[in-house]
Amino acid sequence: MNGPAFAHPGEIGLTAFVLLAGVAVIAGLRLAGIVIGSRLSASHPLFEWARAVAAAVIAAQVALLVGHPMGSVGVLPLGVRLGAVLAGFLAYHFTGRSVLAGVAVGDAVILAALAAGV
């Protein structure tokens, strides 16, 4: 594509407005979360709901990445992708629920499979 990223000079102002409006909304929501969250106990049902929603979002993302992978991971067989998930889960479980360890081990399995040309 040749030429400027924006076809019309007015688009720069519109893009800046949309970005600033988005930042303002997110900042407001974060502030509201801090104010509300500081007044609730960690065992409040609202926090339990938020944890459940976060877990569901992560589970859905993993299911999409395993079931319908994109890019170079898409060439790997389903068994390798499921093996990476299992290895990551086992690392998570046996390292005292370390998310970093689980992600690192799952990624290592995927990278090893790609390097081996599986």
Image: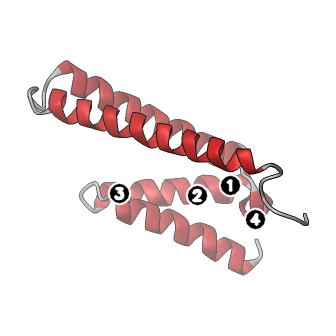
Q: Secondary structure at mark 3?
A: helix
Q: Secondary structure at mark 1?
A: helix
The residue labelled by disc 3 is: 99
Position of 82 with respect to 74 (left or right) is left
Asked whether the beta carbons under mark 4 and mark 2 sit within 8 Å of each other, the answer is no
The image shows residue 45, relative to residue 57, as above or below, that is: above
- Name which quarter of the figure residue 103 lies in: bottom left
The image shows residue 6, relative to residue 2, as above or below, that is: above
- Name which quarter of the figure residue 25 lies in: top left
Q: Give the residue displayed 20% in from the left and 19% down from the top.
A: 45
Distance in Å between CA atoms under marks 4 and 2: 17 Å
Given this view, does label 4 or label 1 mark the residue nearer the observer? Answer: 4
Q: Which amino acid, mark 1? A: Gly
Mark 2 neighbour class, 10 Å CA radius: few under 14, some 14 to 19, many 20 or more? some
Asked whether the beta carbons under mark 1 and mark 2 sit within 8 Å of each other, the answer is yes
Mark 3 neighbour class, 10 Å CA radius: few under 14, some 14 to 19, many 20 or more? some
Asked whether the beta carbons under mark 3 and mark 2 sit within 8 Å of each other, the answer is no
Q: Earlier in the sequence, mark 4 or mark 2?
A: 4
- Quadrant location, the N terminus: bottom right
Q: Secondary structure at mark 2?
A: helix
Distance in Å between CA atoms under marks 3 and 1: 22 Å
The image shows residue 19, relative to residue 87, as above or below, that is: above
Q: Give the residue displayed 53% in from the left and 54% down from the top.
A: 85
Q: Earlier in the sequence, mark 3 or mark 1?
A: 1
The residue labelled by disc 2 is: 83
Given this view, does label 3 or label 2 mark the residue nearer the observer? Answer: 3
